[in-house]
Amino acid sequence: MRSIRVLLVASEAVPFAKTGGLADVAGTLGVELRRKGVDASLILPYYRPLHTSARPRALGKQVEIPLGTDKTRGSLLATEGREGLPVFFVRHDGFFARKGLYGEGGKDYPDNAARFVFFSKAVLEAARVLGLEPDIVHCHDWQTALIPLYLKSLYRPAFPEVRTVYTIHNLGYQGLFWHYDMPLLGVGWEYFHMNALEFYGKINFMKAGIVFGDRVTAVSPTYAREIQTPEAGFGLDGVLRARSGKVTGILNGLDTEEWNPSTDRHIPRTFGPERLPGKAFCRTQLRREGGLKMRRDLPLVSVVARLSEQKGIDLVFKAAERFVGSKAAQMVILGEGDPVAERKAMGLMESHPGYLYAHTGFDEGLAHRVYAGSDLFLMPSRYEPCGLGQMIAMRYGAVPVVRKTGGLADTVREKGPDRNGYVFSGKAPASFMGAVQRALADFSREEEWTCRMTNGMMGDYSWAPRVDEYVRLYAELLMDRKEA
């Protein structure tokens, strides 16, 4: 019996292109699936940075894609990822040879609809031209959400038995475009209604994935429930409730080779739950790197995040003013995002010399060192579909303080023998401050703190159990196909 053939489709994936957690998942899932015996492959746009870094081989194949009344050509390339993962690229320099993936200077590219209509159709043309013959096409986020629609309309004759899984990584980004872009899609105005693509007078790409995907997954069980409520549904909760029987939450996993304190080449000394002195050394070195006073009696609190309202950065700043200002803790802030938030972080560093260090901008090595050197990790996100930061923090012995939402609720526990962090509920800043205060109080209780820290370090955040869930989902879809 042959392996299940799965074609993973994403707009970004490590190590090729990344703006966020989507890339971590898309780049690792295929590798993990192959370890489970699934015949997985991955296809991405060929962005400008890849012209000098990836250097895939040209396949000598082209695809011609209709966009409205025009036709646009792209070429196909390929390389091999980890575990022999076949990785394909769609090249169109007019669409993808740009500085950013989706936009620049905080603004989306105005032709994003055309860019990802082209990519979605090109994926299916590539599958046909290259003879990939997938059983399952697994699509991720709004940039690929039209593919389930196309497989049930334009491409049904070419792929009559192919089934789709559509994964929502963040419902807050839906791919909304004005209705005048409908001719680009090529499916006709008969799909522009409330039960298909129409969303308050606009085209909603993500809605296409939810409505036409054979199965819909969200990146944690709690998030799968939350997005079916008005509070977290971003206007699509009714659509998701209508398909609730086909919606599943599967928690993301970590790349435990990349994030492993016992082998991490980015940190000054490796460590593990049985070798904690190495963490103490990392803490000392992080203080030195950030110009902080050697106050070993104080907990070192950290934040590694996009500096945005969604990540609760305003609460982080309040905590800094209260706990760093009172010399109850030291803090490291690493991230980039809202320019106002970046200036605020730098201002706090100036106001609290020796007690707060801020670095704005992306620095992969520093991120590893911050996780390794921290005692406490703050993640008060207003919503968090899954979150990898809290998992990384726990693996590196940094005890997290999180809001009870999405994947944070699924991974962090404050009470019980497996307690590994601190959890608060609601929107009131006082709830967050209370959780931080509880953590600071426990920091002085060595036995209690060591219990939470080692519980976190010994947790299983790997992809192994999550991949098993995807394999079962794929198998169910193929069984449904046979029974249809």
Image (tube, rainbow, N blue to C red):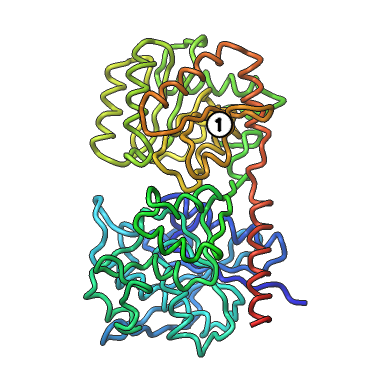
Residue 303 x, y percent position in the rendering: 43, 31
Residue drawn at point x = 32 percent, y = 31 percent: 314
Res 55 visible: no
Residue under numbered circle 1: 267
**Residue that sits furthest to the right in the current view:** 1
Q: Quadrant of the N terminus?
A: bottom right
SS state under label 1 = loop
Density class for disc 1 (Cα within 10 Å; few <14, some 14-19, many ≥20) is many
Give the answer, above or below, for where 183 lies relative to 22: below
Left or right: residue 20 compared with residue 36: left
- What amino acid is at disc 1? Ile
Foreground residue among 64 and 325: 325
Q: Outermost residue, bottom direction?
A: 157
- Given residues 351 and 187, the one toward you in this image is 187
The reply, left or right, for residue 127 in relation to residue 337 is: right
Q: Position of residue 68 (x, y in %)?
A: 27, 83
Q: Which quadrant of the view contains residue 147?
A: bottom left
Q: From the viewer's perspective, tell me whether residue 210 is left or right of residue 372.
A: left
Q: Residue at x 53, y 60 (%)?
A: 217
Seen in the image, is 182 located left or right of residue 303?
left
Residue in the image at 63% along x and 17% along y: 448
Residue 79, image quadrant: bottom right
Residue 239 placement (x, y as % from top left):
42, 64
Which of the 4 image quarters holds residue 3? bottom right
On the rendered image, what quadrant is the C terminus found in?
Answer: bottom right
- In the rendering, at what x and y percent does residue 447 appear? 66, 15
Q: Is residue 264 placed above or below 240 in the rendered structure?
A: above
* Residue 149 shows in this picture: yes
What count of labels does the image hold?
1
